[in-house]
Image: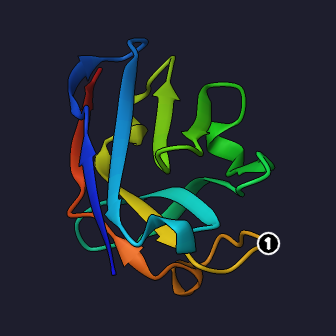
Amino acid sequence: QVHVVESGGGSVQAGGSLRLSCATSGYTSSIYCMGWFRQVPGKGREWVAVIDDDGTTSYVDAAKGRFTISRDNAKNNLYLQMNSLKPEDTAKYYCAAGIYRGCRNSTAWYNYWGQGTQVTVSP
């Protein structure tokens, strides 16, 4: 079992930056893929960025050039640097960890989830 905890959310004005962190504990040696997803009320959870244990990354088009995903493999911790934030980035952001290689952007690919951290971007 793996425990996942996000931190770093908050409220910022458009154009600002936030850095999300995700700490994992437990059987972390089983983790390969990690990713960030986000969700707004009334909508499904959508992927933002994913990273494999070899450092291969993938971003949703809306995040390219603004967000950077990174991980500390020694600790299996995950980070998301978000710059040039827009009001449409407002959502609850979730950290996910999966036991399969070859990261995919589907929520079904991930086995462990945190409780989420709220990001609010005002105009």
Name which residue lies at 59% across and 45% down. Answer: 73
User: Does residue 30 appear left or right of residue 12 in this picture?
Assistant: right
* Circle 1 SS class: loop
Camera-side residue: 117 or 102?
Answer: 102
For residue 21, which quarter of the picture? top left
Location of residue 43 in the rendering, given as x and y in whole percent from the top left corner:
35, 73
Q: Where does label 1 land, which residue?
A: 102
Q: From what the image shows, is residue 9 above or below residue 76?
A: above
For residue 65, which quarter of the picture? top right
User: Does residue 92 appear left or right of residue 99 in this picture?
Assistant: left
Residue 5 visible in this rendered orientation of the protein: yes
Camera-side residue: 77 or 62?
Answer: 77
Q: From what the image shows, is residue 58 above or below residue 31?
A: above
Residue 44 visible in this rendered orientation of the protein: no
**In the rendered view of the protein, which quadrant contains the C terminus?**
top left
Q: What residue type is labelled 1?
A: Gly
Name which residue lies at 71% across and 73% down. Answer: 104
